[in-house]
Structure formats: C-alpha cells, structure tokens
Amino acid sequence: MTSWIDFWDRPNAVYVNQRNLDAHFECLTRDLEHFVPVGGRKVVLDFGCGEALGAERLAKGCSTLYLYDAAPAVRRRLRKRFAHNGRIIVLDDQELRQLDTGSIDLVLVVSVIQYLRKNELVSLLQSWHRLLRQSGELIVADVIEPGTPIILDAASQLRFAWSNGFLMPALAGMARMFFSDYRELRRKAGFAMYPAGEILELLREAGFDGAGLPRNPGPGRHRRAYRGRKLADAPA
Ligand SMILES: C[S@@+](CC[C@H](N)C(=O)[O-])C[C@H]1O[C@@H](n2cnc3c(N)ncnc32)[C@H](O)[C@@H]1O
C-alpha cells in the first residue's frame, strides 16, 4: 500500500469496533453541532468525512450537507447509508469540482490534513476558499502539532476507550496497528503535523483570516483546531 487514500479505502484497524466508531462520531457530532445548530439552513461541506455516522444529526442544521471522501469504498457506503435523506448529498471527485463558487457556508475538514502533502493542502485551501461564500467559514480540526509524542495520542485513545467501554479491543487494536504496515505507510506517505504559526500563515496565504479555536472537536482534546474566515480583500 502506498497512499493514505488506499489505506482508508480498505478495512483498517484505526477504529477497533462498532462501539469505537459510534462513540467517536457521537463525540464529534456533539461538538460540531456548535457550528451547525439544529434548525439552521446552512450549506455545509464535510471534506474527508469518513463514515460520517453523525451526518443525519448534522443535516438537521443544514439545507444541504455535502459529504466528500477521497476513498471510493467509503463513498459507496455513504451513498447506501444516506440514500433516503434528501438533505445529504455524497459527492465524488468530479461532483466536488463542479460545486458552484461561493455556494457553501461552512467547510469542515476534520482529521484529514495529516494525510495530505503540503502542496495538496495549499491547493485545497484555495478550492475551499473558492467554494465559500464571503460570510462563510472553514474549520480545520484535529491538527497535530509537530513533536506530539505518539504516547499522547495513544493515551488519549485509551482514555476515550476506557470511558466508552472498549478498552480491551482498543489495546488489541493498538497492538495490531503496531505490527501492521501502518508505520511503514506513515514513513513513506508522510504524516503531516503543523505548528499553529504555519497553519495560520497557510490560511492567510489562501485568503483567510485564521484563528485557533479554544477546543478541538471530537475525542482528541490534545489536538488543535482552527477557523478561517474569508479576508475582505482576499484573492477571488
Ligand atoms: C481519520 S479519517 C477522518 C474522518 C472524519 N472526518 C472524522 O473526523 O471522523 C480521515 C478521512 O480522510 C479521508 N482522506 C484522506 N485523504 C484525503 C484526501 N486527499 N481528500 C479527501 N479525503 C481524504 C480518508 O479517506 C478518511 O476517510
């Protein structure tokens, strides 16, 4: 396996069981509702949405919730899961490219940028900027600071597993990951980490006024989140 998209396109041990997935999305969705309150009419793009188990709940605050994930197998599952919900639209690569300029109120990018090369991130920041209305907002979350010891991530996962009743499967999952090709892929494909100053600089270069958020949405409390608002004099 050579790319992160291939990794996410296949079964993997990141979420150790259904309970883990449910607890993850329960926590994440509760936090994201702050940006998408129930009863709202926002047009939202969840970029790199993964299994998106909270999408129906989030869609209650949207007129349209677009889900995009680069992994085709993920998109197939999403299409099946949300076929009955008229507010949720699953996009493929081409449909994403065809979204109208200035048509989105909020772009969510949670736990994705670690899998992107810097030039991909730069180009994506520009396309999110294009998609957002002038009053729109970009949220980039679950950003890992360089130098974050792997033990901090592991401890956070185990604490979350403990409080949600899947500690033993989580320990077994960690052991499986340790002996899998995950570490090799991380070395080959890269695993991007950014200090706050660099993210804020990249946001500014893409035409956003960026700021750190007080709390990262989702279970990884030690990770960072940022919001970007379009600068008034930003490049079109
Ligand atoms: C850790 S999961 C995050 C899922 C969800 N956003 C969450 O926070 O639970 C990372 C997701 O990013 C997707 N992804 C990886 N590279 C991507 C890219 N270049 N474009 C879009 N999605 C990507 C993967 O397919 C995977 O579903």
Image (tube, rainbow, N blue to C red):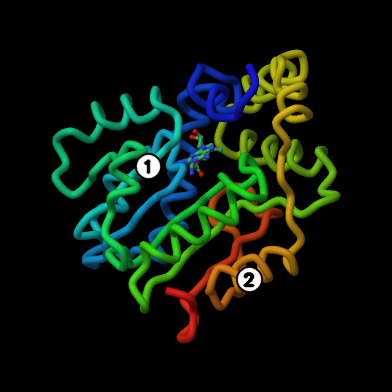
Q: Amino acid at mark 2?
A: Gly
Q: Is mark 1 within 8 Å of ligand 1?
A: yes
Labels 1 and 2: the sequence-earlier one: 1
Q: Camera-side residue: 114 or 100?
A: 100
173 or 96, nearer to the observer? 96
Estimate the spatial distance between the alpha carbons at disc 1 and disc 2, rounded to whole Å.
24 Å
At label 1, which amino acid type do we have? Tyr
Q: Residue at x 27, y 64 (%)?
A: 103
The foreground one among 89 and 25 is 89
Kindly indicate whether the residue at mark 2 contacts the one at mark 1 (C-beta within 8 angstroms). no
193 to 85, vertically: above or below? below
Report the label total: 2
- Does residue 156 sit above or below 4 in this rendering? below
Image coordinates for residue 9, horizontal then vertical, percent: 48, 23
In this picture, residue 44 sits left or right of residue 146? left
Q: Circle 2 — which element?
A: strand
Q: Which residue is mark 2?
A: 212
Left or right, 222 with respect to 101, comes to right
Q: Residue, x 81% and y 48% (percent of image)?
A: 148
In this view, the residue in front, 130 or 191, is: 130
Residue farthest toward the bottom in the current orientation of the protein? 232
Q: Residue 158 appears at what percent x and percent y?
A: 69, 35
Q: Residues within 10 Å of mark 2 (few under 14, many from 20)?
A: some
Which is in the foreground here, disc 1 or disc 2?
1
What quarter of the picture does the N terminus occupy?
A: top right
For image coordinates 65% across by 27% down, the residue present is 167
Per the image, label 1 sits on a secondary structure element best described as: strand
Q: Residue at x 70, y 31 (%)?
A: 189
User: Which quadrant of the rendered structure holds the C terminus?
Assistant: bottom left
Measured along the vertical axis of the image, is residue 219 above or below residue 224? above
Question: Which residue is farthest front?
Answer: 236
Q: Which residue is mark 1?
A: 68
